[in-house]
Image (tube, rainbow, N blue to C red):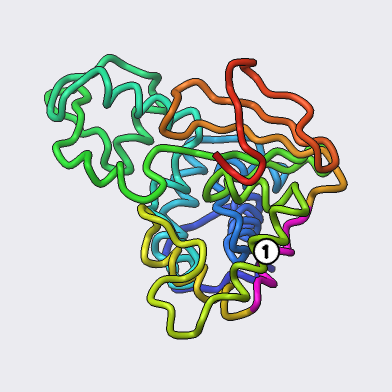
């Protein structure tokens, strides 16, 4: 029997419930904001659009999930590829304008989160697109751990280096420990963070940075698949046991520690 017991009326399969368990376990970790597609893969479930929306319906109705999610729902519901497609649509079309099809499932997912609306059988960009620019917006920073067979999104590029570069993590923990109790904003909080993310960082700061050591991968290969505000084409960075081993494309560059 699943450990998930809520008042939700959504009926799910065992595989879908296992996916929810993966999501909830990951969302308790400060450096992870795993999406549904990634959790499906971790639960051994092939991606299925209808299942994805059932899981989304469930978690958005579940009080436990609401407490764990630190970003807007579309951060978790959309796949990374759908986020890229949405960003391209925002650049090519104006709010309310009819858009070219991006694939039936992708359009349906974007409609589900409110990015698209349907009018006279056509998809149009919603009028309130600015909300999709807030917080993580339509960016993603995916961490891939080949030796574990895991993928998950993290909050920002510096988080990846905290996980994979010992000196960066030690600096971050030291900064948290220096924070005074009456500081108005948690150490590490930056513009664009959601209020819930700031509170999570504040709690981690008061705990002396223990939350930053839950995800430590400097002794293995870790890959960052990143699409932030600078590019619509994902940048791939490979850290091999604490050292940058590969960057694709070659014109991309990162500072160890973020940037």
Rendered position, 241 above or below 198: above
Foreground pick, 140 / 235: 235
- Residue at the extreme bottom of the image, as rendered: 181
Q: Which residue is drawn at 66% across and 68% down?
A: 174
Q: Which residue is drawn at 85% across and 41% down?
A: 241
Where is the C terminus found, in terms of image quarters? top right
**Could you tell whether 230 is left or right of 218 in the image?**
left
**Could you tell whether 37 is left or right of 10 in the image?**
right
In the image, which residues are magenta?
208-216
Where is the N terminus found, in terms of image quarters? bottom right
Q: Where is residue 123 in the image (x, y as percent from the top left)?
A: 22, 24
The answer to whether residue 210 is magenta is yes
Q: Mark 1 points at which residue?
A: 212
Q: Position of residue 44 (x, y in %)?
A: 72, 43
Foreground pick, 153 / 51: 153
Is disc 1 surrounded by few (<14), some (14 to 19) or many (20+) residues within 10 Å? many
**Could you tell whether 177 is left or right of 8 in the image?**
right
Q: Where is residue 37 in the image (x, y as percent from the top left)?
A: 57, 40
- Mark 1 lies on a secondary structure that is helix
In the picture, residue 211 is in which quadrant?
A: bottom right
């Amino acid at each position: 029997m699943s450990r998930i017991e809520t008042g939700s009326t959504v009926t799910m399969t065992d595989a879908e419930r296992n996916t929810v368990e993966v999501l909830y376990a990951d969302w308790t970790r400060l450096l992870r904001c795993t999406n549904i597609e990634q959790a499906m893969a971790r639960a051994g479930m092939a991606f299925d659009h209808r299942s994805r929306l059932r899981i989304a319906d469930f978690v958005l109705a579940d009080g436990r999930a609401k407490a764990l999610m630190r970003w807007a729902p579309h951060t978790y519901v959309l796949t990374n590829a759908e986020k890229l497609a949405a960003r391209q649509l925002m650049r090519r079309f104006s709010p309310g304008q009819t858009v070219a099809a991006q694939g039936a499932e992708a359009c349906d997912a974007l409609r589900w989160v409110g990015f698209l609306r349907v009018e006279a059988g056509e998809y149009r960009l919603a009028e309130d697109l600015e909300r999709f620019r807030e917080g993580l917006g339509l960016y993603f920073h995916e961490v891939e751990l080949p030796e574990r067979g895991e993928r998950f999104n993290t909050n920002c590029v510096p988080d990846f280096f905290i996980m994979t570069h010992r000196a960066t993590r030690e600096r971050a923990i030291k900064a948290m420990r220096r924070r005074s109790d009456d500081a108005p904003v948690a150490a590490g909080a930056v513009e664009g963070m959601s209020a819930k993310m700031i509170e999570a960082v504040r709690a981690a700061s008061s705990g002396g940075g223990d939350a930053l050591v839950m995800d430590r991968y400097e002794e293995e290969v870790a890959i960052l698949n990143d699409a932030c505000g600078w590019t619509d084409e994902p940048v791939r960075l490979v850290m091999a046991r604490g050292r940058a081993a590969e960057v694709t494309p070659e014109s991309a560059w990162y500072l160890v520690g973020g940037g």
